[in-house]
Image (cartoon, rainbow, N blue to C red):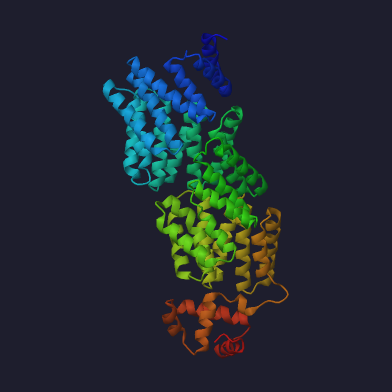
């Protein structure tokens, strides 16, 4: 086939989104030395889409040089921008900065208004979004105005997407998600170029996961999956789509399917050159292994996640807790909480922190973290985040001996998770509800909650949860001491020493009313009616 025919057929395949075919035809034409700068731009684009990193780097660089040679500094700057964009996604930040600088110099030398000036505002705004989201938001607004001036749909979409992410960082998730939804309308209508389409899809789904908007994340993941299936040659976006699908399947309780998707993502993203998203794929594998009790596999996958640049927390801390290493779990979760750069990151760490801190007996710290989570959940618009907050608060109330208040709070968390079709979280709430019933002396109610949770854990394959429930639920030999909370044991010991409720409250830094409630709960659990009988019980069972 002649060079001209290869070029024409390659351009046709590109327009029809037959990416592998376009790549092969344009590569063949390039081998004959017949590609013009705009065709090299096409070759670079398809090489990026099919995961041929060395080719897109070379083709965009040559396209840039070709446009410079013919005096088209604006088109040259566009090629330099996409080179920088590609290097950012490949984790090569120095090269990205160099190409962005070259693009900036090009538009300055051109000296004409152009959409490329808007594109070149994006990198700094994206980089600064965590550090100063308000400044980034203002920059994204300017970029969008430039996009609208030049009717550049890709620039408008990228800038509006950036505004949405900045608003989320500023604590306005409802406004932010509304903007992202607006961008995704343009995506599904096919108005954007393929690279921008894939990038916006992935960014919007990540934003849904950040704000724990499970239904919206599932909806847009399905849309991304349909887009990827319509273009099977795609490499980077298909791998990322598999990660998102794994997260959705995990939430829905289909853990075997979730693990399969995560393993598939690892395979796609690690070869031929590791993609930055491979860390998230390994982390997702680790999460499923941990939930199923496959601790050795989880440990290995968390380490692979860390090596690929994805912090393995909070999953690794929860793994340590499941292994019985509560002190190590607490050290890990405290560290990442201290380092959390923003509210979005912190919100994903707080519920694991509450569970771990309660396990090591640090009730005060657990209560503080539950209060942090409640503040974040208010006004977030996320039903999942609200359920997490209620669950954390319920666990703290339960540990502090206020089973009545805990019962109502935990029931609302359970109902929310059930409505969201998140069976594992709902089952864990059932276990806590059963503990509340038991604390209140309702053994029948506890048995009903525990049995429902047991069936759910069995269906999910949640072996660690099932084992913990089995240890908790011993119908044949109820242990009154084991049924006392840590705070109730403290109160009982002080009662046995003859202290009044007011003195106990002073010692434990709680109100006299709270002490009275603890004493009442202790009497019910131990089957006694006086302080002297409770004292005798404490001595008989060597609690003093």
Residue 161 rendering spot, x and y as whole percentages: 43, 36
Residue drawn at point x = 49 percent, y = 30 percent = 53
Residue 235 rendering spot, x and y as whole percentages: 56, 32
Q: Which of 248 and 439 is in front in this view?
A: 248
Looking at the image, residue 369 lies above or below residue 268 = below
Residue 192 rendering spot, x and y as whole percentages: 47, 26
Looking at the image, residue 203 lies above or below residue 192 = below
Residue 542 lies in quadrant: bottom right
Q: Which residue lies furthest to the right in this view?
A: 476
Residue 214 rendering spot, x and y as whole percentages: 55, 46
Residue drawn at point x = 48 percent, y = 20 percent = 42
Residue 190 in view, yes or no: no
Q: Does 294 sit left or right of 140 as displayed?
A: right
- In which quadrant will I find the C terminus? bottom right
Residue drawn at point x = 47 percent, y = 14 percent = 33
- In which quadrant will I find the N terminus? top right
Residue 113 in view, yes or no: yes
Residue 480 lies in quadrant: bottom right
Looking at the image, residue 449 lies above or below residue 341 = below
Looking at the image, residue 537 lies above or below residue 62 = below
Q: Which of 229 and 90 is in front in this view?
A: 90
């Amino acid at each position: 086939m002649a060079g001209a025919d290869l070029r024409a057929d390659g351009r046709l395949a590109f327009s029809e989104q037959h990416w592998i075919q376009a790549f092969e035809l344009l590569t063949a034409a390039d081998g004959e030395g017949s590609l013009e700068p705009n065709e090299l731009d096409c070759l670079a684009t398809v090489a990026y889409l099919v995961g041929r990193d060395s080719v897109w780097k070379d083709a965009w660089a040559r396209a840039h040089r070709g446009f410079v040679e013919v005096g088209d500094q604006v088109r040259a700057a566009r090629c330099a921008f996409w080179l920088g964009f590609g290097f950012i996604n490949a984790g090569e930040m120095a090269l990205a900065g160099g190409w962005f600088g070259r693009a900036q110099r090009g538009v300055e030398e051109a000296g004409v208004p152009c959409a490329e000036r808007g594109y070149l505002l994006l990198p700094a705004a994206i980089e600064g979004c965590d550090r100063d989201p308000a400044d980034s938001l203002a920059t994204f607004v300017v970029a969008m105005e430039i996009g609208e001036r030049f009717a550049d749909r890709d620039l408008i979409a990228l800038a509006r997407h950036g505004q949405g992410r900045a608003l989320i960082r500023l604590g306005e998730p409802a406004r932010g998600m509304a903007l992202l939804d607006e961008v995704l309308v343009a995506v599904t209508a096919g108005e954007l170029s393929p690279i921008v389409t894939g990038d916006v899809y992935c960014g919007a789904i990540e934003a849904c996961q950040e704000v724990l908007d499970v239904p919206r994340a599932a909806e847009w993941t399905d849309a991304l999956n349909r887009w990827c299936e319509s273009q099977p040659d795609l490499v980077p976006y298909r791998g990322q789509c598999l990660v998102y699908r794994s997260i959705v399947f995990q939430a829905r309780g289909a853990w075997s399917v979730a693990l399969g998707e995560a393993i598939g993502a690892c395979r796609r993203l690690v070869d031929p050159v590791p993609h930055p998203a491979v860390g998230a794929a390994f982390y997702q594998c680790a999460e499923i292994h941990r939930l199923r009790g496959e601790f050795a596999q989880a440990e290995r996958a968390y380490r692979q996640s860390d090596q690929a640049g994805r912090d393995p927390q909070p999953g690794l801390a929860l793994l340590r807790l499941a292994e019985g290493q509560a002190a190590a779990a607490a050290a890990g979760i405290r560290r990442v909480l201290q380092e959390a750069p923003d509210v979005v990151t912190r919100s994903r760490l707080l519920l694991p922190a509450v569970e771990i801190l309660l396990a090591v007996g640090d009730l005060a710290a657990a209560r503080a973290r539950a209060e942090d989570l409640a503040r974040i959940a208010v006004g977030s618009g996320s039903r999942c985040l609200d359920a997490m907050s209620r669950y954390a608060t319920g666990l703290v109330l339960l540990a502090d001996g206020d089973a009545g208040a805990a019962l109502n709070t935990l029931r609302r968390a359970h109902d929310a998770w059930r409505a969201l079709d998140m069976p594992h979280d709902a089952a864990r709430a059932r276990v806590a509800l059963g503990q509340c019933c038991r604390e209140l002396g309702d053994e029948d109610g506890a048995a009903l909650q525990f049995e429902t949770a047991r069936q759910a854990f069995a269906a999910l394959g949640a072996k660690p949860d099932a084992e913990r429930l089995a240890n908790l639920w011993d119908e044949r030999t109820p242990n009154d001491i084991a049924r006392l909370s840590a705070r109730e044991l403290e109160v009982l010991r002080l009662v046995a020493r003859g202290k009044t409720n007011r003195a106990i409250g002073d010692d434990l830094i709680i109100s006299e009313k709270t002490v009275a409630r603890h004493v009442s709960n202790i009497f019910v659990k131990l089957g006694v009616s006086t302080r002297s009988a409770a004292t005798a019980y404490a001595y008989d069972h060597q609690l003093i």
